[in-house]
Image (cartoon, helix red, strand yellow):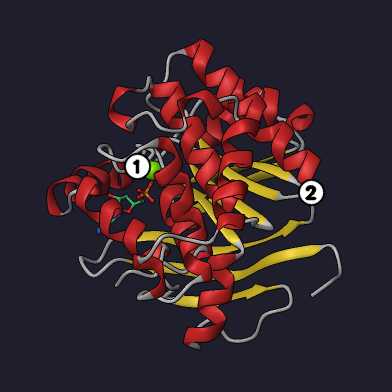
Amino acid sequence: MDSQAIVRLERIGVTYPNGVVALKSVSLQLNRGEFAVVLGASGAGKSTLLRTINYLKPPSQGTLTVSGLGDLNTPSVLRSHRQQTGMIFQQHQLIERQSALQNVLMGRLSYYSFWRSLMPLPKKDQQLALDCLKRVGLVEKALTQVKSLSGGQRQRVGIARALAQQPQLMLADEPIASLDPASAHNVLSLLRSICKTDGISALLSLHQVEFAREYGDRIIGLADGQVVFDAPPSALSDRDLQEIYTAPLDTQFADYAGVRTFNPQTTKTSEELEHYGWN
Ligand code: ADP
Ligand code: MG
């Protein structure tokens, strides 16, 4: 793997137990310090791609290599990978009845054993969590319960939680899907500037072209589980967009079939716990 690479996918294929082929021979390399956007229609495989990189959904075929780490099937290696990978979820997946600060502290849990994590975390972690809240402009909401925060504020808490992990890679699955345009711009520019300042590589999925164009250093177009475009936004033509957004009929059907057979809400919540090592 070359020294610029942080994660490398080689001919990755993912098939769900119900037979849906969500990724087909995806090869790509994420580079250090890059802010890359996966663009694609609903059902294209964006979430699966991010979940595969985090190894929440191990690939059915191909190889995933993480810089500096060995075999991801080894539990301790996987733990290190998850520890250095911050994850931001579509529905932010925060604990509603807890304060913003308690939620951000969850980002520190992967550094402790399960039993140790049941006790209050050391002062330095609390300070770090507060610093992260400060960076997303929410230090004055530290003790406010998440349920009384706005959508944009919640997603900023989600960013602070991922940041508290001190990750080298940030994965964000449609981080602005439930936000109004002004909050969406606010969240994306904040995420981008934090990643650039800290040298964190980022891969986020979006379905809106305008946002991908404005914030991405690189756009990876996904259609029907395959990479159909991979270049800087300036190279994205109308023809490329057509290719990204025109999925064959059978995939659209597969998407409906998929929606009926699993519930993304429960799936993501248990994945969230798994990401933090609580399973
Ligand atoms: P996107 O995030 O781009 O909307 P997904 O990765 O969620 O795409 O889905 C890709 C395909 O895999 C879709 O056809 C979807 O229905 C299917 N799919 C996603 N998750 C599951 C699952 N847990 N079980 C079965 N099929 C799934
Ligand atoms: Mg998705």
- The kind of residue tagged 2 is Gly
Residue at the far top: name it: 182
> What is the distance, in whole Å, between disc 1 and disc 2 at their CAs?
25 Å
The quarter of the picture where residue 7 lies is: bottom right
Write the residue at 41% across / 32% down.
143
Write the residue at 77% across / 46% down.
198
* Picture layout, residue 234 above or below residue 16: above
Q: Which residue position is annotated with label 1?
A: 94
Q: Which residue position is annotated with label 2?
A: 199
Helix, strand or loop at mark 1 = loop
Q: Position of residue 236 (x, y in %)?
A: 70, 30
Helix, strand or loop at mark 2 = loop
Write the residue at 48% across / 35% down.
157
Label 2 crowd bin: few (<14), some (14–19), many (20+), radius 10 Å: some
Disc 1 and disc 2 in contact, CB within 8 angstroms: no
Tell which circle, 1 or 2, labels the residue nearer the N-terminal end.
1
Write the residue at 50% across / 63% down.
54
Front residue of 65 and 81: 81
Would residue 205 be seen by someone viewing this image from the given angle? yes
Q: Position of residue 82 (x, y in %)?
A: 53, 67
Q: Is residue 30 left or right of residue 9?
A: right
Q: Position of residue 203 (x, y in %)?
A: 61, 47
Report if the beta carbon of the residue with label 1 is closer than 8 angstroms to ligand 2.
no
Instruction: Choose mark 1 or mark 2, whichever is in front.
Output: 1
